[in-house]
Each structure stands twice: as C-alpha cells, then as structure tokens.
C-alpha cells in the first residue's frame, strides 16, 4: 500500500507548542495522538512555600489571555480555605471582571483564530483584506473587553487589583460612565457577531459528549462564572470539593501535559459548548433569543458550531456587564476582613475555554504547603483526540490538503491553550 505523510510545520492560531499525529491504514484510523511537547512550567511547585497573598499575582501570569480566570480561581480557593465569603457589590465586581476576560478572549478566538478556518484563509491578516470592517469590529470588541479588565484590574494583562477578600481598590459609580458607552456599542456589535457566525459553513458532525460545567443553585438566574456545583449531562452533580474524588489526571507517553478523565467514564468536554448545554436557560433573554434566531436550540452537539456559542457568550458578557454597572453601588470597603489560619480550599471557575480547578493547602502562617491546578485544555485533550478519530473516519476520502485543514480546524474548535505560551503546532498524518 502507498504510504503518505502530511506535515504542517506551523499553526499560528493555537496557544502553545504541540503536535498531532494521525495514522490511517486503508479506510481506518489506526492511531491519533495530540502531542504536547513544550516543557512543563512547574507553577504548582513554584507556589509551594510562598505566602498565600502572593498567589493571585503569580497565577495570573500563567496565561496572558485568561489571567483573570487563574487569578480568580486562586482567590476563591484561598477564601474557601480561610472561611471568607465575598458577596454583594464585591461579588458583582468580580463577575464584571470576568465579563471583560470573556469578551476579550472569546473575541480574539472568534475573529482572529477561528473564523479564518471557515472562510478559507490561512490567517486573519489575509482575511482582513476581504473583510476589513468585520476584522475591525472584532478588534474594537476586544478593546472593550480589555477596557473592563484595565478598569477593575489595574491593567490589561495580568491584573493587579484583585486580592483575597475582594479588591485593593473599588470604583465610584460615576467612574463607569465612559466604560458603559463602550459596552453599549459592544452589545450591538456582539449581536452582529452572532448573526455573522451563524452564516458560516459547518460540517455535519456530532458526538455523544459528556459535557461538564459549573451550575449554581444559590443564584438560579446566573450563567456560571466563578462558583457553583460541577454538573454534567450524564448525571454528575458534585460540590467542587469532591472534584478529585471523581476526576483524575493521567500521564501519557506522547505528551508532556497530563490528561484529565472522569474516573467513572473517561473523556469529557468542558468549555462554551458545555456551559451552553447545561445552562442555556441561565443566559440573558437577549442571548437566548439571539441564539434561537441563529438556528441553535438549548442543545448543541456540533463542536464546529462552538464559534456561534462563543459569540453568544460574548453577547451575554456585554449584557451582564451593563446590568452590573446599572445596579452598582460603591461598597463600604474594598475587601472583607478575615483571620489567617491553616486550611485547605478548592474551587472551579469558568475560564473562557472551560472549567479551571485550583486547590491549595495553607499553614497557620499562610504559607502554601501544596497546590494543584488543572487547566481546561488538559481536561479537553482526550475529547479532542476522540473528535479527530471520528472526524477523520468520516472524512477519510478527502484530499490530504483538505483533511489536514479540517483536522486543524477541529482542534481550534476547543480554543486550546496548549501551554499559555507561543503559537506552534505540527501535524503529521501517516497513511498506509
């Protein structure tokens, strides 16, 4: 039999260094491996021996695109360890900060990383030659998200205003005026984004996924950001503190990144599609109506349509941000007081690309004795490999060039942050 090999030496629209290997024999897929070969960064080891108050600023540096998620997961876990409850307007401000990150991260992915796949362009620069106004809209929307993070976090990247118990400084009501104008424009732009992405061409591809996301019962009207129980569409419903009883990380020989699995059932799916399927009725009425008008119902199992779902989450984030600003009243103190003591705390929050788990164990003096961080991409690695296996089996008669393109597109459905670092992926397809 003739053997063919396909290599893609540079894929500049994922974050991190990795490789994909696909082996095809006749009309069967024999092997699929998503290889993460970038060296480990050892953030968990770096945190041990540090004071608890240092952790939010350290973990924010894990990712330049979603630093809020890492920072917020850290403070929630620390607060859980110390018995701290943050509510009222401080809690609302944290949701607003998360809105900013979802807007800037999702917009970057939708417009700059994923849309070129659907429109047949190798990158956004060449797409911008034919769609200049669309790309400008995406850039302007991303700036609006960055403006929220700068306003509340102190700077666009790696914010510095978040602390255990709340914030170092909180804004006055009148300071929101200029920001609200940007967000009002952004909400209209997000509506157009959902309509635009709904017109893109989508492969007919669905799988029987186990979707996993947060769902809060204490705040039944809220789409999940930073608290809740961990639930799935196949019966999982646990407190975050039981995470490690049900999920495990496994080492695989072909990857420097651990694979996360459900102990009972194996691979599972986190991210916008999971949140959407498990919390559709928690979206704002505007986001629900827009999703339905775009052709989506409460359930969507096509990962290629995640670009529409992400666009809907952008719309929700603008809508939620404006709701928070409208109802804001400056709290008496920027942070709640607490007493330092030994304890263990764990939490999940919803980063733009999915559940992010943190656990910390503290000494009486507040030193970090142990740390565990499970990012969403490690949780999605097995399901990405499963998608690729099933998709290649279905599209096996495509030309090598087209099959390679669509395999890369299938990976980008998940907005993988392979190492929160540089942009590089190699694809190797072997046929026998």
Image (spheres, grey):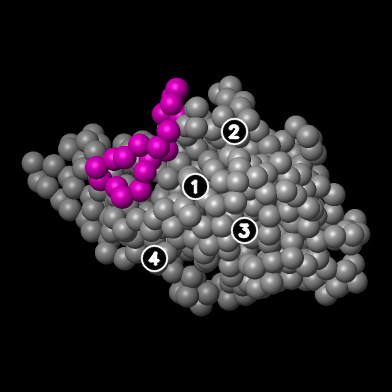
Q: Earlier in the sequence, mark 3 or mark 1?
A: 3
Q: Earlier in the sequence, mark 2 or mark 3?
A: 3
Tell me residue 411's x, y (percent).
Answer: 41, 50
- Which residue is tagged 3? 53
Q: Counting other residues with Cα less than 10 Å from the Cα at mark 4, is it few (<14), some (14-19), or many (20 or more)?
A: some
Q: State which mark lies toward you, 2 or 1.
A: 1
- Which residue is tagged 1? 369
- For the residues labelled 3 and 1, the Cα–Cα distance comes to 13 Å
Residue occupying the point 84% across, 54% down: 89
Residue occupying the point 49% across, 60% down: 62
Residue 417 quadrant = bottom left
- Which residue is tagged 4? 423
* Pick the front one: 168 or 277: 168
What segment carries the magenta color? 248-266
Q: State which mark lies toward you, 4 or 2.
A: 2
Q: Counting other residues with Cα less than 10 Å from the Cα at mark 2, is it few (<14), some (14-19), or many (20 or more)?
A: some
Tell me residue 211's x, y (percent).
Answer: 55, 34
Residue 250 in magenta stretch: yes
Tell me residue 427's x, y (percent).
Answer: 28, 55
- Which residue is tagged 2? 241
Residue 51 in magenta stretch: no
Task: Single out the residue that lies furthest toward the left.
Answer: 1
Q: Earlier in the sequence, mark 4 or mark 1?
A: 1
- For the residues labelled 4 and 1, the Cα–Cα distance comes to 33 Å
Tell me residue 189's x, y (percent).
Answer: 72, 64
Residue occupying the point 24% across, 42% down: 253
- For the residues labelled 4 and 2, the Cα–Cα distance comes to 34 Å
Instruction: Specify whether 374 is left or right of 132.
Output: left
- For the residues labelled 3 and 4, the Cα–Cα distance comes to 31 Å
Residue 171 quadrant = bottom right
Task: Single out the residue that lies furthest toward the front.
Answer: 365
- For the residues labelled 2 and 1, the Cα–Cα distance comes to 18 Å
């Amino acid at each position: 039999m003739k053997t063919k090999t396909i290599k893609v030496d540079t894929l500049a629209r994922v974050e991190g260094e990795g490789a994909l290997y696909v082996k095809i024999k006749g009309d069967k897929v024999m092997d699929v491996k998503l290889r993460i070969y970038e060296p480990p960064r050892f953030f968990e080891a770096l945190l041990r021996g540090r004071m608890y108050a240092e952790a939010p600023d350290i973990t924010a540096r894990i990712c330049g695109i979603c630093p809020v998620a890492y920072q917020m997961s850290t403070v929630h876990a620390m607060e859980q360890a110390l018995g701290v409850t943050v509510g009222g307007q401080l809690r609302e401000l944290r949701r607003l900060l998360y809105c900013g990150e979802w807007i800037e991260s999702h917009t970057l992915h939708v417009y700059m990383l994923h849309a070129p796949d659907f429109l047949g362009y190798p990158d956004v620069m060449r797409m911008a030659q034919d769609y200049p106004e669309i790309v400008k809209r995406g850039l302007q929307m991303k700036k609006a998200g960055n403006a929220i993070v700068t306003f509340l976090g102190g700077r666009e990247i790696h914010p510095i205003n978040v602390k255990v118990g709340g914030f170092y400084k909180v804004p006055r009501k009148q300071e929101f005026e200029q920001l609200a104008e940007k967000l009002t424009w952004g909400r209209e732009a997000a509506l157009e984004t959902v309509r635009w992405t709904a017109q893109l061409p989508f492969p007919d591809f669905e799988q029987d996924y186990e979707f996993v996301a947060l769902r809060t019962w204490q705040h039944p009207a809220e789409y999940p950001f930073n608290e809740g129980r961990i639930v799935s569409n196949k019966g999982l419903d646990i407190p975050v503190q039981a995470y490690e009883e049900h999920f495990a990380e496994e080492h695989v020989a072909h990857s420097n990144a651990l694979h996360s699995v459900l102990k009972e059932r194996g691979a599972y799916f986190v991210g916008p599609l999971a949140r959407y399927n498990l919390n559709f009725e928690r979206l704002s009425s505007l986001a629900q109506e827009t999703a339905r008008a775009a052709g989506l119902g409460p359930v969507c199992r096509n990962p290629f349509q995640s670009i529409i779902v992400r666009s809907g989450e952008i719309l929700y984030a603008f809508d939620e941000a404006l709701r928070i600003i409208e109802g804001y009243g400056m709290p008496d103190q920027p942070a709640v007081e607490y007493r330092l003591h030994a304890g263990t705390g764990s939490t999940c929050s919803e980063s733009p690309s999915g559940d992010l788990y943190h656990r910390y164990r503290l000494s009486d003096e507040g030193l970090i004795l142990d740390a565990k961080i499970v990012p969403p991409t490690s949780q999605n690695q097995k399901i990405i490999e499963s998608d690729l296996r099933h998709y290649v089996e279905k599209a096996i008669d495509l030309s090598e060039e087209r099959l390679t393109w669509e395999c890369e597109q299938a990976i980008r459905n998940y907005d993988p942050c392979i190492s929160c670092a540089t942009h590089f992926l190699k694809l190797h397809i072997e046929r026998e």
